Image: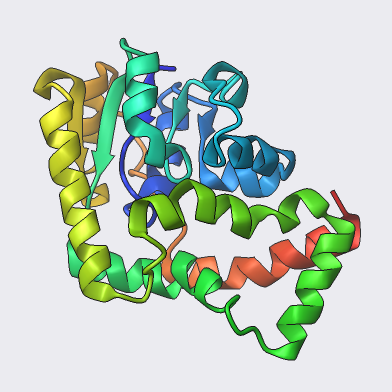
Amino acid sequence: MKVIGAGFGRTGTRSLQAALELLGLGPCYHMSTVIAEPYRVRQWLDVGEGRSRDWDTVFAGFRSALDWPAAAYWRELAAHHPDAKVILTVRDPGRWYDSVSETIFRAFLEQRRPPPHRRLIRRLVAWRAPDFALFPRMARATFIDPVFDGRLDDRDHVIEVFERHIAEVKAAIPAERLLVFEAGDGWEPLCAFLGVPVPAQPYPRVNERAAFRRKRPRRLARLILRGR
């Protein structure tokens, strides 16, 4: 592992994943990896529920890792890979909360009292893709409960957790090993930190809020139709 991402989801991690892969530091593990390969849900469920912390197996074949659930274990991963560099992706706390509450958190909050059509979809996913059906339980075990105490709709609490997390990473990781990075910073600070040339193409910009919401129904439809 060459790069460990300590930033929360919705801090530009999808764009950074694309950037690292363009720079030759891929494959880059991301929550999208878990969604695309649902057998990985059970690996993280074992981590979250305390049955296994076999990081070499979880990240086999990957040169970098970002986003949840990996970011919830940044301390352990940084210790397990002492030569890896750490990137802490950040953004304005209020704008971050607006983004995460309309995307990742919204999906979990809706599960508390889902409408009838969502209950039907959930049953179909459990039947056709039993690994992915464990995704909500995995997310609760790895970051929803341990990081946020399950209080996703408490704006002040979540922002406090976000800001405390940033301070803890800055305090724990030596300055020469850490890059605090916003997607708007572009290639220059990232490439200087990693010691690689700046690409000619623009810095990637992917997974905006509207795109996130559009993708979810398609993902569920594929799981139901194909099964996993």
Q: Please, which residue is most extreme toward the top here?
A: 83
Which of the pair 14/201 is nearer the observer? 14
Query: Which scheme is used to colour this image of the protein?
Result: rainbow
Q: Looking at the picture, how far across and down is residue 42, in whole percent?
A: 69, 40
Vertical relation: 111 (above or below) 137: below
Vertical relation: 125 (above or below) 227: below
Q: Looking at the picture, how far across and down is residue 116, in whole percent?
A: 75, 89
Which of the pair 4/20 is nearer the observer? 4
| Residue at horizontal 45 percent and vertical 68 percent from the top | 105
Vertical relation: 26 (above or below) 158: above
Total marks placed: 0
Which of the pair 117/153 is nearer the observer? 153
Q: Is 40 situated left or right of 27 in this image? A: right
Q: Looking at the picture, how far across and down is residue 90, in whole percent?
A: 22, 50
Q: Is residue 19 visible?
A: no
| Residue at horizontal 38 percent and vertical 14 percent from the top | 81
| Occupied quadrant, residue 74 | top left
Q: Is residue 219 visible?
A: yes
Vertical relation: 70 (above or below) 94: above
Q: Looking at the picture, how far across and down is residue 189, in whole percent?
A: 17, 32
Q: Is 5 situated left or right of 46 in this image? A: left
| Residue at horizontal 39 percent and vertical 34 percent from the top | 73
| Occupied quadrant, residue 115 | bottom right
| Occupied quadrant, residue 168 | top left
Q: Please, which residue is most extreme toward the front here?
A: 50
| Residue at horizontal 57 percent and vertical 41 percent from the top | 49
Q: Specify the quadrant that holds the N terminus.
A: top left
Which of the pair 101/158 is nearer the observer? 158
Q: Please, which residue is most extreme toward the bottom here?
A: 116
